[in-house]
Structures are given as C-alpha cells and as structure tokens.
Amino acid sequence: MAGMTTPVAVIVDAAAYAQAVEDAVKASAAYYAGGTSVLDDDAYDRLVRGIAAWEAEHPDQVLSDSPTGKVAGGAVEGDVPHTVAMLSLDNVFSPEEFTAWTASLARRIGHDAERFSVEPKLDGLAIAARYTDGRLTRLITRGDGTAGEDVSHAIGTIEGLPQELAEQLTVEVRGEVLMTTAQFEHANEVRTAHGGQPFANPRNAAAGTLRAKDRAYTVPMTFFGYGLIPRPDTDVALAARLRECAHSDLMTRASELGVNTTGSTAVPGTTAESAEQVLARVQEIAALRTQLPFGIDGIVIKADLAGDQQAAGAGSRAPRWAIAYKLPAVEKITRLLEVEWNVGRTGIIAPRAVLEPVEIDGSTITYATLHNPADITRRDLRLGDHVMVHRAGDVIPRIEAPVAHLRTGDEKPIDFPEVCPRCGAAIDTGEQRWRCENGRNCHLVASLSYAAGRDQLDIEGLGHTRVVQLVESGLVADLADLFALTRDQLLGLERMGETSTDNLLTAIDTAKGRPLSRVLCALGVRGTGRSMSRRIARYFATMDTIRAADAETMQQVEGIGTEKAPSIVAELTELAPLIDKLADAGVNMTEPGATPPATPGDADGGADGGADGGAETTGGPLAGMTVVVTGAMAGTLEKLSRNQMNELIERAGGRSSSSVSKKTSLVVAGEGAGSKRAKAESLGVRLATPDEFAALIADFLD
Ligand code: IVH
C-alpha cells in the first residue's frame, strides 16, 4: 500500500469492490486484535472511503460485511458478551466536516449541543474493565463490539488501571490500553532479548502483549479511561446517577476512583461551548502531539451532557453523539532499500535508511534515521524489509521497526562498514555511535567549511570548493593552519588571482578578532551549537577559564546538565592542541563585555549562580529580559542575521529565544512578522519595531 497518495481508493467495478471489502475486513481484524499491521491507518482510511463512495453509487450491491455498515473489527469474535456494545467512532478530517457534524447533531437533538468534551484519541486498544465491589475482576477486549476476549491475565501489568478502586463500586470502566514510547522501547528490548521479532509500533505492541498468555516475561502498559458505565448488578441509584452524569464529570469521578485519565497528561480532556472553541482545542492538541510520550491519532469530541447523548442515540457502528477528528497519519509502511553510512563533522559514522519514497502528512520521505549499528542489530532490520516509518512534525523520520510478517525471505542482511567510508581509517566501535579513528580530521573539509561559515568565523571567500582546494593541496590540515597561510601559498593555487588572495587573507585576518563565542562554535564541540557556545563564552568570558572548568563548573551554564558537562569538558581536552595553535596564531580568545565568574569553579561564581555569569554582572539595557526577534529587520539592524541579533541581545544583557511565551519580555517584530507577533499580542507581551529596538540598545551596536 505504500506510495498510494490519493485521498480515496478508486474502485472501478463490483469485483474490485468485493476485493476492497475483503482487504478492509482483514485489515480491521488485524487492527483490533492482531498485533500485526496489514495496512497502515492512512491506507485503511482511504480504502474505506473508496468503499463508501462505491456504495453510494451502488446502494443495491452493498455487501453485508462491508466495514461501512457494521461494527468495525467484526472478524474477531470473543466469548465474553459486552453488556453494552463497545462502539466505534465515525471520523471527520477537516474543520468543515466537523462543523457539518455539529450541525447534523443539532438537527438530530433539536438544538445546539449544550457543551462538548474534547479529548485526545489515544492510539491503543479499547478495553472493558469490570469491577465488582471495587475489585478488578475481568478485563475484556473490544472484539467485534458485542463480545470480546477475556484478557484478565493482563491484570496487574497495566499502569493506571488499579486492581482496587478507591470505593467499593460495581462498575465497568472503559478506555484505551497503550504503550508509551518508553514502554514500547522496553517491550521491544525484552522481546528481542527473548528471541522474538520486534513489534512494528506501540499499538501493535500493546495488542500483542495484551493477548499473549503464558509469556516468560511481562512488560508494562498504560491505561487511560474514557468511559464509566453501570453493570447489570450495579446498585440502582448509582446506575441512574452514572447515566445522568456529563462525560466530563464521569472522567473526574473515574480519576477520583484511582483510574488514570487524560487528565494526568499534557493534553487533558477539556470542555468547550461551541464548535469554534472545539476547533481551537483541536489545534492545541495537534500542536502538542509530537511532544506526547504516547501516540494519538486524533481528537475525540463528545456531546458532554448525558441528555444530549441520549437524544442523539447511536447507530449500529458508532454513537451519533461523538466523533473522531482524525489527525494526519504519522506512520506509513514502505520498504527499506539501502543503508548509507555518512561521516559527520566530528567523525561519527551514522547509518541512514534509504526508503522507497512514501508520503507522510504532505511530505515525501526518502530517508530515515537509523541511530547506530547496535540499533540495527537489535531491531533485526534487513534490506528489502517492509518497515514502519514514523514522521512527526519537523523531527527527522525514523524507522519504528520491520513489519516481520511481510517478509518474503528475499531480504538481505545489512552490511556494516569495516573501515571508515570517508577516509578508510579504522573505526572506533567502542561506543554505541561508531566513530572514525581520525575523528574530526576525517571530515576536515566539512569541519573547516562549518568553522568558516557566517555564524562562526564568517570568513568571506572561503566556501566549500576553496576549502577542498586547501585541504587537497596539503596547505591546511587543521583549523589553525588557515591562519598561517601566506600570500605565496595562496597564489600558487589554481584560480587564485591577486585580488581574491588579498581578499581572503584580509578575511582570515578579520576572523582572528571574532568573539570567543564564535571561535568556540567554530571548533565544533559536540553537543554545543551557536547559542550554547554563546552561553558558555558569556559565562566564562575567556578560553582559559573555560578550559579550567571541570564538569561540575560547566554545569553552571544554563542548559548544560550532568550528561552534557563531562562530554564538553572531554572534548575541550581533546581540542587543547588545536586551541593552543589557534591562540598562538593570534586568534582572539575572549568574549567582549563578559567577565569571568568571580571564583572559577565556585558554584556561586556567577553572582546569580545562573546562566549569564558575566553578562548579569555587567547589566545592560536588556538585563533580565527575554527577547524574541521575528520578521525582517530594518534600519541599522537590516543587515544583521538572526544569529547576530541574538548575539546583540545577549551582549546587551538579555536572553534570546526563538519562541514567544508568557515569559517573553519583548518581541522585536519587523516587516512580515506573523504568528509570533500575533502570539505576543494575545499574551500582552511588549512589542518593538526594529528601529525602537535599535534605539534601546544603541550603545551595544558595533
Ligand atoms: S469514546 C462510544 N474516547 O477510538 C464511544 N474512544 O475509533 C467510543 N479511542 O474504539 C469510544 N481515544 O478504542 C473514545 N478519548 C477517547 C478515545 C477513544 C481512543 C478509541 C476507542 C474506540 C476507537 C474508535
């Protein structure tokens, strides 16, 4: 199915229709029960929409087992009847479709729904948990909606589903069992360690784990409740109260009883009074999706009041009082064609998957990260495998796992490099991430080009081709060699005339005077980029103080924790000869305007003990302020890059940030500023034009 891009599967005749129904039924059965993927969600949705379109044209030929007309998941039947059917949900895919649904709901119940509840659609499996006098006695899967499978053996392995409620009630709690990202990784580790195939994604992992009996190991899962209903033997008064309760109140009640709900997450269920409010909340939840520690595939909107729900009623497949607003799929199945091994700036040799191109949420994905060789082995990936690819937001796509049951036997093992694919040197395989023994020299061209870049030493005229020339001619073997280049040496190179030689020498000379933050950044210390380099340079003020810092002192810099600090210190030790050579060549090693912490190494060294040790003590017009720059700069600031604006803000005592929040003190908004300006306005954050800002920090402009 990978590679299909039409929103609706096109069905041309009755035979294709029958085949489509069969495919959908199979996929649905696997989805609700199996733990293996046949179609990814998106392909399934397209198929069902195609089936529905064909049925609309041929109403007399609709097959009885069509997924459009029955409770989905019908192929797997269990032996425990549900007292109240476990229904599915209809879907909408756009604000327009959602608004149309609210209108049809209003028509059905004779008035606008009084209130909606809005909660994430958790990507797991529906389950019914039966409590008798407060004790969890039975767990049943959804099955075909009318009867499910008894999975009570899983009691005790599902976090958030207590074995004992806070009150001795006889009730049924319904909700979703899933694996958080961490639980999924753990489950696959344990499973592969026991010789099993890894699960393709957290949903399959939860399905497989829930149904597996007599395993040698148990792995935890998580439960989120979204329903609380009476059982046949529930006390009559309690049953009546539950039936009259608004959904949002039922969720509060469930949580009081000790059941986990979405209330414990970054995307708690909320209520909304209008379709507009619902849509705003849908956007909020969608925006948070990539940061959640569990998967969601949409947002469920329910008429909140019991009266409205009863008036709306239910069809055989889904209630009419609730709808799923589906978010774009973040996972697709495609094939792993090749693995490339790329050597990074620091000599790290990283595998990258080359995929059969697949469209996920509007982008065509051809590559995915594979982390490291151990990861490939652990997940037993092979060339030619069907793989589940995950892409969320701007994060680099990753391969979740191979889809083992789609193997044909023709898959080939992935070859690991024996020598560095860039320079042929030996590989240090001592760490999880493999590294060329030549380290950053392996990739000298890349590291020199980076160092010469606009946001680092900003050496005009030293582009990629010129760097290659310098390295290949043997004139430059490390960054410091640049500063020893002579006029004659440069003139001896091909295509180097007098003017370009003189210009390059001037540019190199200018680069010697760049602030310490940029020199540090140019060194390419792993784990530090532009803003981290600025923070380190401003905190310590001189290269000597930085080099004198141990891991503990390094942690005084904001954003450097216990993990990063030792690796930065170790990197700096490794770079010591190069730093000495740069200093000898006359490269500046101090940060203008910053003063070293009073007692280097003292935890309180930076007066405030915080990030900007030197900066805070020198004050400045932006002291204590967090400033965000957006839109095009103008006037005296026109030529400054974002990085230079951030440097300026920090020189003037402020903190630069790229996102607007309540904590932002000032937003400098130029021409073309969009969402950040709007957000600042809505939060009441102070705004300034580029000119106003220039006047504010005039003393700090070069
Ligand atoms: S309400 C009668 N709420 O989505 C209403 N379902 O596609 C039935 N799901 O079978 C369910 N999160 O497994 C509801 N907050 C949520 C949900 C949710 C996930 C699942 C549930 C259902 C499926 C329908």
Image (cartoon, rainbow, N blue to C red):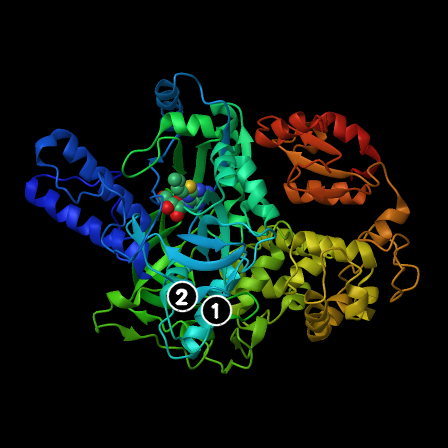
Q: Is residue 350 visible?
A: no
Q: Are marks 2 and 1 in contact (CB under 8 Å)?
A: yes
Q: Which residue is mark 1?
A: 219
Label 1 CA crowd tier, 10 Å (few <14, some 14–19, many 20+): many
Q: Residue at x 16, y 30 (%)?
A: 56
Q: Which label belongs to residue 357?
A: none
> Does residue 281 lie above or below 561 as drawn?
above
Label 2 CA crowd tier, 10 Å (few <14, some 14–19, many 20+): many
Residue 221 at x, y percent in the picture: 49, 61
Q: Residue at x 17, y 39 (%)?
A: 10
The response on whether ligand 1 sits within 8 Å of label 2 is no
Q: Is residue 60 visible?
A: yes
Residue 213 at x, y percent in the picture: 37, 71
> Looking at this view, is 291 or 320 the one in front?
320
> Looking at this view, is 111 or 346 the one in front?
111
Type of the residue with mark 1 = Val
> Does residue 468 lie above or below 643 as drawn?
below
Q: Which residue is mark 2?
A: 209
Question: Does residue 49 appear to the left or right of 595 in the view shown?
Answer: left
Q: Secondary structure at mark 2?
A: helix
Residue 339 at x, y percent in the picture: 36, 68
**Ligand 1 position by quadrant:** top left
Image quadrant of residue 138?
Answer: bottom left
> In the picture, which quadrant includes the C terminus?
top right
> Does residue 129 lie above or below 322 as drawn?
below
Residue 17 at x, y percent in the picture: 12, 42
Q: Closer to the N terminus: mark 2 or mark 1?
A: 2
